[in-house]
Image: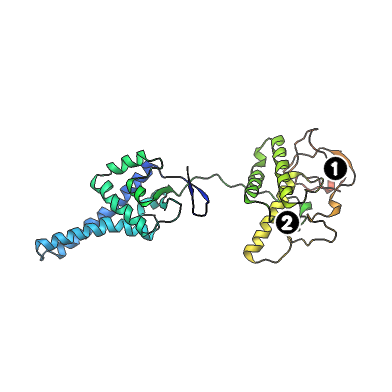
Amino acid sequence: MSELVTGEAVALELRPARLPSRALAVLIDLAVTITAYVVVTIVLVASTASLDEAAQIALSIAAFLLVLVGGPIAVETLSHGRSLGKLACGLRVVRDDGGPIRFRHALVRGAIGTVEILMTFGVVATIASLVSARGRRLGDVFAGTLVVRERIPTARAGVVPPPPPWLAGRFTGLDLSAVPDGLWLAIRQYLTRMHQLDPRVGWTMAERLAGDLAARTGAPAPQGVPPAAYLAAVMQERQAREARRAFGGGVGGGTGVPRAAGQDVTGVSPAVAPVGGSAEAPVDGRFGAPVSEAQPAVPRSTPSAERPGTGFVPPA
């Protein structure tokens, strides 16, 4: 993995292409270019048979420069670093800062590539790529470019579970402007992988993330709400706000539930906090805490017939 820094001081993690994939891409490009050069040469020989020898030599040199040198330069410039071989191998030429290449980058790469690839049969380019830490040949070094992989296998993204119905619309008044993107990413990763964690470890992580989120929003989590459920509800509110911002929705709560009178700044009605009932550990479920006497107790007074099937125990 190669970390590049853009002009805006943004670190980019790009995966440089390895020598085998680059060599395969070059072979595909050479096969196409040489085929085109042979076809052009045959056409020129047939059409310039009546010309003298000097004119034929001049046309041959022009065909060599236009097809074998100018062709790859034009293709990389117009495709922003994706020739036919690189497209087939999932590669792309980018600048050192991660941006798309321009004509001058493609010109330097093509001109030096004529020497280190065509005239030396790729020996110089191979040695330079093996010596370079990021697998760059001489053309990349002088042009300030890098060949990176575009098709990188990634893990299947998990789905953020929805919060329980009794938390719908409870965080419509929460101020989320001070929450950094890194914390949102950590919360999303936890919610998508919490079923793969040990119950105790998951509960500890949820409490820590809920504490960080409450510190950023300036309002503590409602009493009696499991931390994982609190994180899921706030994440759903953020996603709803982004959807309204992107699609021009109206102003209001993330779930479309109007904010009732008497709610506090967190959007939680005073009735949410439990006022009585026997205390016992929360049951295991989608967002429930691990069954342990050491875990915080969650009061409940709702009859079992009225409990939702999400694993939560709604407050009285």
Q: Amino acid at mark 1?
A: Pro
* Location of residue 265 (image quadrant): bottom right
Q: Amino acid at mark 2?
A: Asp
* SS at badge 1: strand
Residue 121 vs residue 165: left or right? left
| Residue 22 coordinates in the image, percent (x, y) | 36, 45
Sequence-earlier tag: 2 or 1: 2
**Alpha carbon separation for disc pair 2 and 1:** 28 Å
- Nearest the camera: 240 or 5? 5
| Residue 299 coordinates in the image, percent (x, y) | 85, 42
| Residue 173 coordinates in the image, percent (x, y) | 76, 58
Whether residue 30 can be seen here = no
| Residue 13 coordinates in the image, percent (x, y) | 50, 46
Q: How many marks?
A: 2
Residue 84 vs residue 153: left or right? left
Numbered badge on residue 198: none
* Location of residue 237 (image quadrant): bottom right
Residue 306 vs residue 134: left or right? right
Residue 32 higher or lower than 153, as above or below = below
- Nearest the camera: 6 or 31? 6
Whether residue 94 can be seen here = yes
The residue where tag 2 is placed is: 175
* Location of residue 36 (image quadrant): bottom left
Q: Which class describes the residues within 10 Å of circle 2: few (<14), some (14-19), or many (20+)?
A: some
- Nearest the camera: 53 or 198? 53
Viewer-nearest of labels 2 and 1?
A: 2
Which residue lies most toward the right here?
Answer: 276
Residue 295 higher or lower than 235, as above or below = above
Q: Residue at x 67, y 52 (%)?
A: 179
The residue where tag 1 is placed is: 299
- Nearest the camera: 99 or 230? 99
Residue 201 higher or lower than 314, as above or below = above
